[in-house]
Image (cartoon, grey):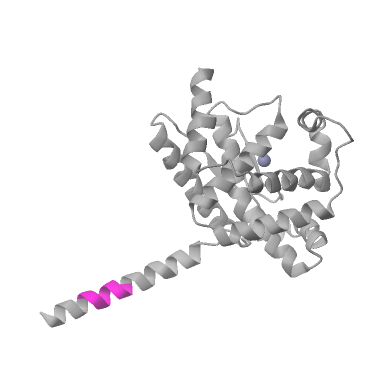
Amino acid sequence: MEKTTLMRKTSLLFYFLILSNLLSAQNKVFEVYTDSSLLIKDNNALIADIENRVKALDSAFSFKGLKTVTDNSPGGFFLGKQNFIHHATWNLEEKFIGQLATEITQSNEKGKEFVGLFVHGFFLAHEIGHALQFHTHNWKKENLYENEYQASEIALLYWKDKGKKKELKKCYKLAKLAVSKLENPFPENVDKEKYFTEHYNEFLQNPKKYAYVMFSQIVKVFEDKSLTNFDDFIKTRLLQNKKTNR
Ligand SMILES: [Zn+2]
């Protein structure tokens, strides 16, 4: 009797050890990814998790086979028609967003941490947020500024829900630092939503201008006390709109 209990305890401990090793090996979110297959796997798991969360609120919801892809180019983005999210590993981002992050933080090491926190953390959920907008018919081609803002609201609420408090705190601090270091690309007294939408390609081609928009929005999102939780937000801001659109 005693022997079996001990054995059971031992095997249970063994099982937990294996499980925790597996989890720590897989969980690289909010750190830089150097392995593209791991990045794809983890992002696909995030997609599945968010899809299940939304399905629980509306059983008809589906991402319709949304996939994660990587190729030899940097940048994170979602393409609606192709239904994929593109992400890139650190070796591709290092010279792209990595350089900008180093400039902002004034340190290679902190720049790398910046990329991990945002590109391989916060923005993973932000891109899935765009897919959510698309698949619930909430993508507004007439207001690209609002699309970006809302994707960051979704990202914040999702990660908060996942208990990433420590990581989010670092994101908030770094987003404020970024805004203080980057030049405001908007002319005075201009309607930001209209201006950003009309000059979207210009912003895309200038990472500093684009980054200013992202991080100034993120600071606002973090400071918005009216944001409640992920489920409420999805229900009231995305799923209800979907129904009126039908
Ligand atoms: Zn975006």
Residue 147 horizontal side relative to residue 136, left or right: right
Identified at 50% across, 31% down, the residue is 236
Q: Which residue of the protein is positioned furthest toward the bottom in this rendering?
A: 3
Q: Which residue of the protein is positioned furthest toward the right in this rendering?
A: 188
Location of ligand 1 given as a quarter of the image? top right
Identified at 48% across, 33% down, the residue is 235
**Residue 100 percent location from the top left of the image:** 80, 56
Q: Which region of the structure is painted magenta?
A: 8-14
Residue 165 horizontal side relative to residue 198, left or right: left
Q: Which residue of the protein is positioned furthest toward the left in this rendering?
A: 1
203, 170: nearer the viewer: 170
Identified at 61% across, 62% down, the residue is 31
Determine the image quadrant of residue 15. Answer: bottom left
Q: Does 142 appear in magenta?
A: no
Q: How many marks?
A: 0
48, 237: nearer the viewer: 237
Q: Does 9 appear in magenta?
A: yes
**Residue 25 percent location from the top left of the image:** 49, 67
Q: Quadrant of the N terminus?
A: bottom left
Majority secondary structure of magenta residues: helix
Q: Is residue 54 above or below residue 172?
A: above
